[in-house]
Image (spheres, rainbow, N blue to C red):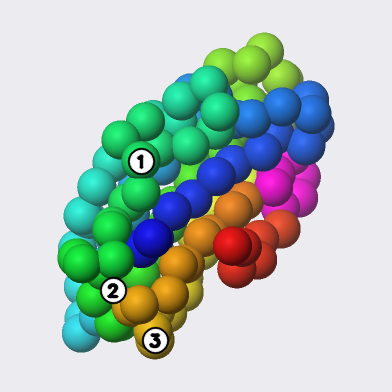
Amino acid sequence: MGLSTHVLDTMHGKPAAGMSVALYRTDGGQPQRVKQFTLNADGRNPDGPLYDTATLQRGTYRLVFDVAAYYRSCGVELPEPPFLDQVALDFGVAHTEQHYHVPLLCTPWSYSTYRGS
C-alpha cells in the first residue's frame, strides 16, 4: 500500500477538506519537498497514496499540514500568531513492504497522530 495520510478536523467533526499539505524526504541534510497537495472532500490526497509500495523507500520523511490557514478558511478567528500554524510530523519508514498511514486529528489548539492501517 505504501504511504498515505488523512486529516480530520476534530473541532468541526469532519474531514479537513481544502487543507494544504507538503511531503518532504528528510534523509541526509536538507529536507527535499516531494509533493504538495490539497486535501479532497474526504480529507485525503486526491491522487491516492503518496507513495505506492514499489516506490516507497526506507528513510525519514516529514509531512507539513497548514493547520492555521485551513481554520482561517473555515471562518475560525485565530490570534496572531496562531497557537498552531503549520504542524510538521517527522517519521521513519523501516519496512517498505508495509503500509504506513499517517493520520492527523487537529483543532486550532491541539493535534494527535499515530501510525494507522
Ranked by sequence position, the earlier of labels 3 and 2 is: 2
Please give the count of numbered marks on the rendered protein.
3
Secondary structure of the residue carrying tag 1 is loop
The amino acid sitting under disc 3 is Ala
The amino acid sitting under disc 1 is Gly
In the picture, which quadrant includes the N terminus? bottom left
Q: Please tell me the numbered disc located at residue 105.
A: none
The amino acid sitting under disc 2 is Thr
Q: Please tell me the numbered disc located at residue 94.
A: 3
Q: Which of marks 3 and 2 is in front?
A: 3
Judge by depth and name the residue closer to the eye, 82 or 2. 2
| Residue holding disc 2 | 26
Q: Is residue 60 visible?
A: no
Secondary structure of the residue carrying tag 3 is loop
- Tell me, yes or no, whether the highlighted magenta stretch contains residue 23: no
> Where is residue 61 drawn, in percent x and y?
35, 70
| Residue holding disc 1 | 48
> Crowding near pointer 3: few (<14 within 10 Å), some, many (20+)?
few
Q: Classify residue 78 by image quadrant.
A: top right
Q: Are marks 1 and 3 in contact (CB under 8 Å)?
A: no
- Give the residue displayed 48% in from the left and 37% down from the top: 44
Q: Distance between the residues labelled 3 and 2?
A: 14 Å
Q: How far apart are marks 1 and 3 (CA)?
A: 21 Å
The magenta segment: 105-111
Residue 94 position (above or below residue 106): below
